[in-house]
Image (cartoon, coloured by chain):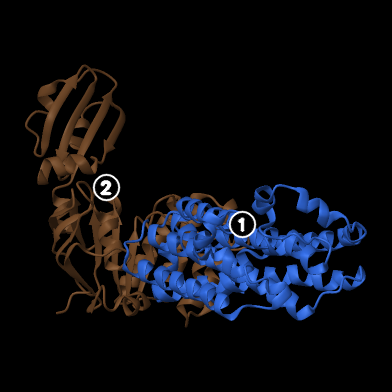
Chain colours: A blue, B brown
Amino acid sequence: MLRNIFLKTFYEHRRGLLWWALGLLAYAAMIIGFYPAMDQMPDINQMLEMLPKELMAAFVGGLTDMSSPVGYLNSQIFFLMGPLLLIIFAIGQGSAGLAGEEERGTLDLLLANPVSRARVVAEKLAALITMTLALAAALWAGLAIGAPLVKMEIATGRLIEATLGSALLALVFGVLALALGAATGNRSLSVGVTSALAVGAYRLNAMSAAITALEPYRILSPFHYATGADPLANGLNWVHTVVLAALVVVFAAAALFMFRRRDLAV
Amino acid sequence: MNNIIHTSQLTKSYGKARGVLALDLAVRPGEVFGYLGPNGAGKTTTIRTLLDFIRPTSGSAAVVGLDSRRDSIAIRRRAGYLPGELSLYEGLTGRDFLRYMANLRGGVAWRAVEGLAERLGASLTQPIRTLSHGNKQKLGLVQAFMHQPELLILDEPTQGLDPLVQQEFYRMIAEARAAGRTVFLSSHVLPEVEKTCDRVGIIRGGRLVAVEEVASLKAKALRRLEIRFAASVPPAAFAGLPGVRDLQVENSSLRCTVTGSLDAVIKAAAEFEVLDLTSQEPSLEEIFLAYYA
């Protein structure tokens, strides 16, 4: 487990990762567990329609269907909570990757070895991506195992696609946090700026479902590309997926560029 | 003969303070070179520039004949480095940490790692966060020496080491030198440099103010001496002794500064009943003021 930077990053975070995975599994199981109760309330959709749509938008965007499996899972997981939890993890990991090591002062030792800065960035990035995907898999597993138990009809393939969409969205912010850490060596700055951007992006996407004036700006929010085309119902929209992947690539390139040209702090 | 470390007009400026200015440093193969200066003089800045952690504002540096910027990886493969402000991975044990370092470096004989750890009495089984500063420093030294590099760059290597371990460290330096390796070590303590080094470069305020053989530095040795006698002594008995300066005799106590050998003062004092004698190395700052100001 200490063969390289990638594996060692895993090794160091093994406990945290395990708790995160268990937490996501438990969360998925809990949501699934409440589904039968929701299913028995056919009036829930009418109730939702009575609420002010701006209020609804803040939490579930344009969703108005809570009783079908897709509507229920979207409102409870894929529209906000699933991506949010993965984003929190990814931002934490992304900012810890390079800036954390620099702030704790271990970077000098790491780079005393014959390893290039590019390799350090690449391995930290690979660890971030793998861990985020592993947690997305835990979330997916909770849903995929739980759904048949409560006779919730949901296509496993679509479930994978929706989870992947959330993971990719989380990676956009996680890799941005990595890049900000690489550029500044400041972990709190990286966490703060990226979190603020994530919250802003979510609000923009959610509110634009209700407020027409915001609609044209929706395309600026990464959330739009992760949830706008409803991957749980329709599968991944390839254009949207490419946009998210492109953001990840751009931020990764920025991390590499900034980390290579900078003076490193003691 | 090519120098192992060679800097040409190396300058690193950070706004106003700190940094180094137009540094021309030459370390010869096979020598133990002491880089001496007060804290904040630019020692760490120089070292971190050699290893490409920071980049020169102007000028250049060559290490083992390679350019510090272009060939940094090759340089780091051939050098061993101990950071001045050592921070280790707190969650790992000493063994895990050294294994990680050995894996990243490649080609390290694990037996050599264990041998060094045993020599220094480094604790390998405890999590690093539970170790004292000195025990962390031992792990830092092990990783710097473990691949028997041709150049050792050690930033304040004896910080926090207890005296016995320091002695073992001095032996390791001597062995490295005997094996033809080069050692570049920084320190802010003169006696340490005198004990281990062949030559000394003195840096102050970012400038290299002198490079001297340790032997010639020793000839300039300056000591503060204080002697307490059982009864009052006549000042005349000590006046005019060779090398004695700033003589103060008050009743039964004597204070002075001595350059070179203490022999004359000791022999003069032996005439009287001596209760106590203390001899102090001057601080680095005093030496600077005396010789290089």
Residue B102 relative to residue B181: left or right: right
- The residue nearer to you, when weighing A84 against B139, is A84
Q: Residue at x 75, y 71 (%)?
A: A140
- SS at mark 1 in the image: helix
**What residue is drawn where x is 29% and y is 77%?**
B180
Numbered label tally: 2
Crowding at dot 1, Cα within 10 Å, few <14 / some 14-19 / many 20+, comes out as many
Q: Amino acid at mark 1?
A: Ala
| Residue A23 visible from this viewpoint | yes
Which chain is mark 1 on? A
Label 2's element?
A: loop
Disc number placed over residue B287 in the picture, else none: none
Coordinates of residue A109 in the picture (x, y in percent): 43, 65
User: Between tags 2 and 1, which lies in front?
Assistant: 1
In terms of depth relative to the viewer, which is nearer, A221 or B211? A221
Q: CA distance from mark 2 to mark 1?
A: 53 Å
Place of residue A67 in the rendered image (x, y in percent of width and height, measured from the top left): 84, 62
- Along the line of sight, the residue nearer the viewer: B77 or A23: A23
Q: Are marks 2 and 1 in contact (CB under 8 Å)?
A: no
Image quadrant holding the C terminus of chain A, namely: bottom left
Q: Is residue B237 above or below residue A208?
A: above
Q: Residue at x 61, y 78 (%)?
A: A237
Q: Determine which of the numbered discs, if any, sits on residue A206 in the image.
A: 1
Classify the position of the N terminus of chain A by image quarter. bottom right
Q: Chain of mark 2?
A: B
Other residues around mark 2 within 10 Å, as few (<14) / some (14–19) / many (≥20): some
Q: Position of residue A115 (x, y in %)?
A: 41, 76
Find residue B266 and report its image quarter: top left
Q: Amino acid at mark 2?
A: Gly
Residue A75, percent from left and from top: 74, 60
Pick whichever, A16 or B152, lies toward us: A16
Which residue, given by chain and number where applicable, does mark 2 sit on?
A: B40
